[in-house]
Image (cartoon, rainbow, N blue to C red):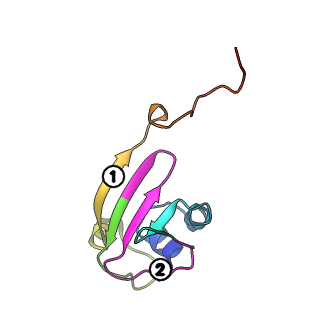
Amino acid sequence: MRLDKYLQVTGLIKRRALANEACKLGLIQVNQVVAKPTREIAVNDIIDIKLARREMTVKVLQLIQGNSLKKAVRNEYFSVIRDVERRPEDMEDFWQDDTDE
């Protein structure tokens, strides 16, 4: 299964278009390598997701058959290794003003 589809179906990223864009921007890594949205996912792959408000690391437990999953069983397809919520204070120069005073 493609990476962008896996992220969308498991609910890690809400929409496939967002997953696709995150991959293109280099925000998604598979096994510590920046991944394209078309990359095929395998069992035991480690996926690092770095979004504006959250950083996650998940391990693929099993592949998905079909195009959708019930929310109740989504956790059976991946395990969360790390989940850190990011705040603007945590990001360097997030609120930095460009003007010199």
Dominant secondary structure of the residues highlighted in magenta in the image: loop
At 41% across and 62% down in the image, what residue appears?
A: 48
Q: Is residue 55 above or below residue 38?
A: above
Q: Which mark is residue 67?
A: 2
Which callout, 2 or 1, points to the residue nearer the camera? 1
Q: Nearer the viewer, residue 35 or 76?
A: 35
- Residue 66 found in image quarter: bottom left
Residue 3 location in percent, x, y? 49, 75
Residue 90 location in percent, x, y? 44, 35
Q: Is residue 59 left or right of residue 36?
A: left
- In the image, residue 50 lies in the stretch drawn in magenta: yes
Q: Residue furthest right?
A: 99
Q: Tell me which numbered mark, 2 or 1, is placed earlier along the sequence.
A: 2
Q: Residue furthest bottom?
A: 65
Which amino acid, mark 1? Asp
At 40% across and 85% down in the image, what residue appears?
A: 65
Residue 39 location in percent, x, y? 52, 79
Q: Is residue 64 left or right of residue 98?
A: left
Q: Which mark is residue 12?
A: none
Helix, strand or loop at label 2? It is: loop
Q: Nearer the viewer, residue 66 or 56?
A: 56
At 40% across and 67% down in the image, what residue appears?
A: 47
Q: Which residue is mark 1?
A: 83
Q: CA distance from mark 2 to mark 1?
A: 25 Å
Give the residues drawn in magenta, as a range: 35-56
Q: Is residue 64 above or below residue 21?
A: below
Which amino acid, mark 2? Asn
